[in-house]
Image (spheres, grey):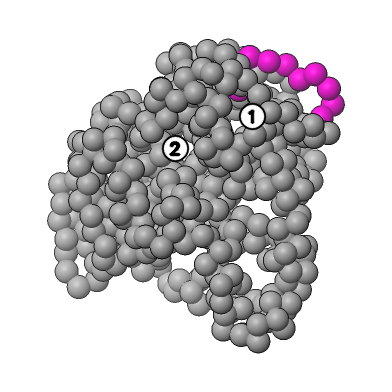
């Protein structure tokens, strides 16, 4: 069934909740969602601000399918990663963001850089500080020059989630509350020279996206990438590092080339990791970003100086929830993930109107169940989680080994 390869993982939420009668209706609904991003000049002098802008430009068009518009200093040049020395306007167009006014009425607006709300329409200002950010419905303040890049990426993800909760769910507080959030404390920060990343889905990509924007402050000189999957059209709806030209290629190859262009040495591993048969050892920091309970449970078999594991919730009520674990710790992985994999064991529900329409059209019950069984996922929650993972990866000593967040209730 072609839809399994092209499915936009964010708009699937409307199918799962029964708000639409078909995938086409879901596309039309999300085609009514628009966004305006306003940027003040001088953004390139504050790395975290630039990271926030680049993340917004990358992630927003994947969800706000009716169009994303940018206003600001189009000729100011970016400085980070693959966008160094490129004009902001050119970068925006690369991501499909309009650089001329689209004349939309009542478009939600995100303000990056100093500014104030001017009317009663949805307006949200991003202010970045040394250890966190504020999202406010009335004002955006000057940001701290020493704010880490992770703060910018996390703020962009949280801001897009706030807009999404408003336009899709009509959440009454979205855009009307002030959000203050701080990074987990990190008393001892250091760059990791070698890193092993297992999983190149939207979470793994968001982690690398954040690391790359931080440049030589954090990006390791050598990275091992492990993933058995290929880039599909569906991957483009959530991934921050893959583009249309990557469709059909292995995720490892597509992302390795992006990293190698930044002078990172990449070891390519195309296999499906299995830790059940033998203990594996490595001295590298290991980042685990896979949606696989069996692999998570077997992490005790992986002997490393440090293992960071992260996961994002599944389903319409959990896709904004993030959990992270740091090993070795006082708890074993086998004691955290106990029992059966609830997701794998549950019956897939195809009773919602959109899936019944798909079944009637295709006559393929198995294919319809495969589509219904795919998880809801968003690029902006991925960005927030990737920023968290990036920050924790540089924290060399901590007494805390587990973290839990819900981006919708920061």
To which residue does mark 2 refer? Answer: 387
Residue 375 relative to residue 352: left or right: left
In front here: 52 or 127?
52
Residue 291 - label: none
Residue 255 relative to residue 203: left or right: left
**Residue 193 magenta:** no
Residue name at image x 67 percent, y 48 percent: 65
Residue 219 location, x and y as percent?
A: 29, 34
To which residue does mark 1 refer? Answer: 99
Secondary structure, mark 2, is: helix
Residue 271 location, x and y as percent?
A: 26, 66
Residue name at image x 26 percent, y 41 percent: 260
In front here: 121 or 308?
121
Q: Which stretch appears magenta?
A: 109-121
Residue 158 visible in rendering: no
Secondary structure, mark 1, is: loop
In front here: 66 or 354?
66
How many C-alpha atoms fall within 10 Å of the one at disc 1: few (<14), some, or many (≥20)? Answer: some
Residue 99 location, x and y as percent?
A: 64, 29
- Above or below, 124 relative to 17: above
- Quadrant for the N terminus, please: bottom right
Residue 125 visible in rendering: yes
- Quadrant for the C terminus, please: top right
Residue 381 relative to residue 391: left or right: right
For marks 2 and 1, give the one nearer the viewer.
Answer: 1
**Residue 115 magenta:** yes
Q: Which badge, 2 or 1, is on the more N-terminal residue?
A: 1
The answer to which image quadrant residue 89 occupies is top right
In front here: 36 or 84?
84
- Above or below, 51 relative to 399: above
Residue name at image x 22 percent, y 46 percent: 266
């Amino acid at each position: 069934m072609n839809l399994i390869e092209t499915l936009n993982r964010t708009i699937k939420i409307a199918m799962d909740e029964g708000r639409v009668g078909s995938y086409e209706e879901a596309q039309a609904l999300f085609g009514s969602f628009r966004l305006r991003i306003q940027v003040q000049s001088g953004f390139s002098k504050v790395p975290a601000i630039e990271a926030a802008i680049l993340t917004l430009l990358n992630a927003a068009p994947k969800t706000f399918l009716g169009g994303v518009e940018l206003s600001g200093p189009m000729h100011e040049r970016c400085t980070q990663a693959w966008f160094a020395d490129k004009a902001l306007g050119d970068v925006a167009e690369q991501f499909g963001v309009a650089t001329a006014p689209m004349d939309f009425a009542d478009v939600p607006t995100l303000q990056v850089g100093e500014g104030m709300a001017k009317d009663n329409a949805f307006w949200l200002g991003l202010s970045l500080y040394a250890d966190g950010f504020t999202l406010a419905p009335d004002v955006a303040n000057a940001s701290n020059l020493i704010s880490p890049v992770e703060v910018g990426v996390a703020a962009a993800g949280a801001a897009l989630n706030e807009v999404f909760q408003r336009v899709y769910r009509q959440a009454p507080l979205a855009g009307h509350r002030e959000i203050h959030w701080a990074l987990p404390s990190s008393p001892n920060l250091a760059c990791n020279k070698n890193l092993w990343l297992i999983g190149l889905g939207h979470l793994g990509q968001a982690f690398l996206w954040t690391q790359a924007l931080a440049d030589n402050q954090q990006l390791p000189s050598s990275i091992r990438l492990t993933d058995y999957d290929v880039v599909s059209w569906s991957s483009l709806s959530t991934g921050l590092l893959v583009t249309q030209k990557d469709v059909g290629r292995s995720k490892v190859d597509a992302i390795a080339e992006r990293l190698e262009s930044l002078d990172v040495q990449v070891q390519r591993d195309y296999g499906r990791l299995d830790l059940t048969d033998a203990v594996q050892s490595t001295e590298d920091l290991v980042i685990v970003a896979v949606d696989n309970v069996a692999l998570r449970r077997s992490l005790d078999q992986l002997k490393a100086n440090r293992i960071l594991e992260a996961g994002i919730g599944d389903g319409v009520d959990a896709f904004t929830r993030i959990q992270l674990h740091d090993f070795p710790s006082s708890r074993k992985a086998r004691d955290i993930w106990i029992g059966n994999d609830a997701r794998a064991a549950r019956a897939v529900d195809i009773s919602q109107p959109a899936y019944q329409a798909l079944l009637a059209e295709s006559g393929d019950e198995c294919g319809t169940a495969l589509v219904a069984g795919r998880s809801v996922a968003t690029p902006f929650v991925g960005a927030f989680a990737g920023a968290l993972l990036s920050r924790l990866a540089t924290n060399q000593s901590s007494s805390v080994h587990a973290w839990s967040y819900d981006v919708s209730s920061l």
